Amino acid sequence: MPSDATPCPICGRPAPRRPANRSHPFCSDRCRLIDLGKWLGEAYRVPGPRAGDGAESPGRPVEQEDEP
């Protein structure tokens, strides 16, 4: 692999750096679109609690009414 290239995270082929390769860090537009499809299909996930799983959010505090 040339020293100015990194392995493509999708297929492993050499991926030259920019400006020679507009798809960097991928080797081609095809691999870039495969990666985008994985994100959109939720194959990749960011760790943490899921929204709506009962975890408290840092929103506004609940207002309590004073009793007379």
Image: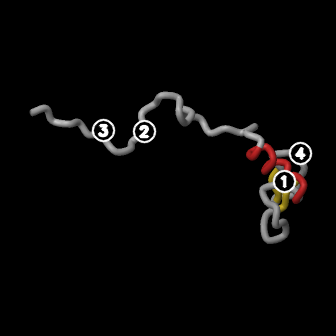
Between marks 4 and 1, how big is the CA–CA gap? 12 Å
**Mark 4 residue type:** Cys
Which residue is under mark 1?
A: 33
Residue 47 horizontal side relative to residue 27, left or right? left
Residue at image coords 13%, 32%:
67
Q: What element carries label 1?
A: helix
Between marks 4 and 2, how big is the CA–CA gap? 39 Å
Q: Is mark 3 on a helix, strand or loop?
A: loop
For the residues bearing labels 4 and 2, Cβ distance under 8 angstroms = no
Q: Residue 36: x, y in percent? A: 78, 51
Tell us which disc is closer to us: 3 or 2. 3
Q: Residue 54 carries which label?
A: none
Tell us which disc is closer to us: 4 or 2. 2
Q: Residue 5: x, y in percent? A: 82, 57
Which part of the image, by quadrant, shows the C terminus? top left
Figure quadrant of residue 20 = bottom right
**Mark 2 residue type:** Ser
Which residue is under mark 3?
A: 62
